[in-house]
């Protein structure tokens, strides 16, 4: 689960990480009041769940495709040009409270498109108004789980303020990776050692050590899969501050985290929320035009790979899990069909605990209930497969059957192109 920058900074501050003074607002009037309280010279920062906000493009309000998503508010299907009179980006430096209000009016309610949002962008409903300060140097710090080592790892670099992937590709030696023993944690003295390795100014070593230690404490306490500060800076007066922050909380630990107060569903893909509420195992929307319904995460990934090998693009990842209810298949098919990009649906079920006859009943019911017109390519095998095939044949509907995954993928690609 992702959280906003202002929420991440509140979390970090709770664990001793120094952050700039700032206020989250939802209206231009609140932005002016916050800027006044902070001295007038502030940064106005759009709050969306995506990086690259400073280099993004702000685009105007557009009619919502709410009908497509039933009761859920949807993202815009198409976007207009840049907001009139607006500079590029969702991060603005202003010199007065009046300017903060003016910039807030330009940003709020519009859509910010970055390299991480896709062409539709994300609607800006909140801003962070933050104090300005002179920056002398920028650094990077993050804690995440290293799957190979099986431990958390602290990653730091002198090259902050840019995508760490680009830094790694350009100069791998610019990145330091420090494995963390969970039984020991990451005490401040190790943070000070790390600050010295980064050749930070002597006057900032203790502050940086506290920042690194606090970052790890926040990571641990929030059950995060990643906690990132990019950048943290040394100011002209030798203060160390976390200027931007990102925390992603492990969904598997959500039951013991205050997710109700941190989660912002308006930032999430509406169809993914629908799938979650319907009890579907796992649904992730993608950019292709071939919808996928599969049982098992590994088989679902193999199905997407096979579609790509056949020259197509999957529209989603969907692991329907152990299929034992017709209603689950009906809703899963409906959600796939809601995607306006979908031109064909590939169903790949290998029944073990999942029953093929239940899947077949669900597919037939979904087509009749929601009047689905897209071609459905079905590769069915395993438990009760004979009964499943009988149900499909008796329905009189135009299913396209396949004996193996390769054949199913080829037929799906052909159907999507027709």
Image (cartoon, rainbow, N blue to C red):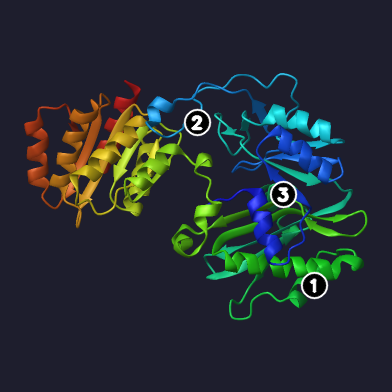
What secondary structure is marked by label 2? loop
Dot 2 or dot 1, earlier in sequence = 2
What secondary structure is marked by label 1? helix
Q: Which residue is mark 3?
A: 170
Q: Which residue is mark 2?
A: 75
Q: Is residue 388 above or below residue 368?
A: below
Query: Is 127 left, or right, of 269 in this rendering?
Result: right
The image shows residue 146 at horizontal and vertical percentages of: 56, 65
Q: Is residue 206 visible?
A: yes
Residue drawn at (52%, 70%), measured in percent from left and top?
Answer: 150
Q: Rounded to the nearest whole Å, what is the CA distance between mark 2 and mark 3? A: 35 Å
The image shows residue 242 at horizontal and vertical percentages of: 75, 56
- Hey, which residue is sitting farthest right in the picture? 237
Name the disc covering residue 245, or none. Answer: none
Name the disc covering residue 192, or none. Answer: 1
Q: Residues within 10 Å of mark 2 (few under 14, many from 20)?
A: many
Q: Is residue 229 above or below residue 364?
A: below
Residue drawn at (35%, 33%), measured in percent from left and top?
Answer: 290
Q: Nearer the viewer, residue 352 or 112?
A: 112
Query: Is 273 left, or right, of 32 in this rendering?
Result: left
Picture quadrant of residue 27: top right
Q: Rounded to the nearest whole Å, what is the CA distance between mark 2 and mark 1? A: 45 Å
């Amino acid at each position: 689960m992702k959280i906003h920058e202002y929420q991440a900074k509140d979390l970090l501050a709770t664990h001793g990480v120094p952050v700039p003074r700032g206020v989250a607002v939802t209206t231009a009037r609140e932005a002016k009041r916050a800027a006044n309280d902070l001295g007038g010279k502030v940064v106005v920062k759009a709050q969306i769940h995506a990086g690259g906000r400073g280099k993004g493009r702000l685009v105007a309000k557009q009619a919502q495709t709410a009908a497509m998503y039933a009761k859920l508010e949807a993202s815009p299907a198409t976007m207009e040009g840049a907001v009139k009179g607006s500079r590029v980006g969702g991060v603005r430096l202003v010199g007065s409270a009046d300017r903060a209000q003016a910039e807030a009016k330009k940003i709020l309610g519009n859509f910010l498109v970055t390299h991480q949002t896709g062409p539709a962008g994300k609607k800006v409903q909140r801003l962070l108004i933050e104090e300005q300060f002179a920056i002398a140097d920028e650094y990077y710090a993050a804690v995440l789980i290293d799957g190979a080592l099986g431990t958390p790892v602290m990653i730091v670099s002198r090259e902050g303020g840019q995508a760490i992937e680009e830094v790694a590709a350009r100069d791998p030696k610019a990145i330091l990776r420090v494995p963390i023993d969970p039984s020991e944690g990451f005490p401040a003295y190790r943070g000070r050692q790390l600050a010295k390795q980064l050749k930070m100014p002597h006057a900032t070593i203790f502050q940086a050590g506290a920042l690194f230690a606090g970052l790890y404490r926040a990571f641990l306490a929030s059950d995060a899969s990643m906690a990132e500060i990019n950048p943290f800076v040394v100011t002209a007066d030798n203060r160390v501050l976390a200027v931007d922050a990102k925390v992603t909380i492990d969904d598997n630990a959500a039951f013991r985290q205050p997710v109700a107060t941190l989660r912002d569903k308006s930032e999430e893909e509406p169809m993914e929320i629908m799938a979650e509420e319907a009890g579907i195992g796992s649904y992730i929307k993608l950019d292709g035009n071939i919808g996928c319904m599969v049982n098992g995460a590994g088989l679902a990934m193999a199905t997407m790979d096979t579609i790509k090998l056949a020259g197509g693009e999957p529209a989603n990842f969907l692991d329907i899990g152990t299929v034992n209810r017709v209603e689950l298949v009906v809703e899963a098919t409906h959600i796939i069909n809601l995607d306006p990009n979908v031109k064909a649906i590939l169903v790949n079920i290998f029944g073990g605990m999942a029953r093929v006859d239940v899947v077949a009943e669900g597919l037939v019911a979904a087509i009749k209930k929601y009047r689905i017109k897209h071609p459905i390519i079905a590769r069915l095998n395993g438990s009760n497969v004979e009964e499943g095939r009988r149900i499909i044949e008796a329905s009189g509907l135009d299913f396209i059957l396949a004996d193996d995954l390769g054949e199913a993928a080829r037929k799906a690609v052909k159907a999507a192109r027709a």
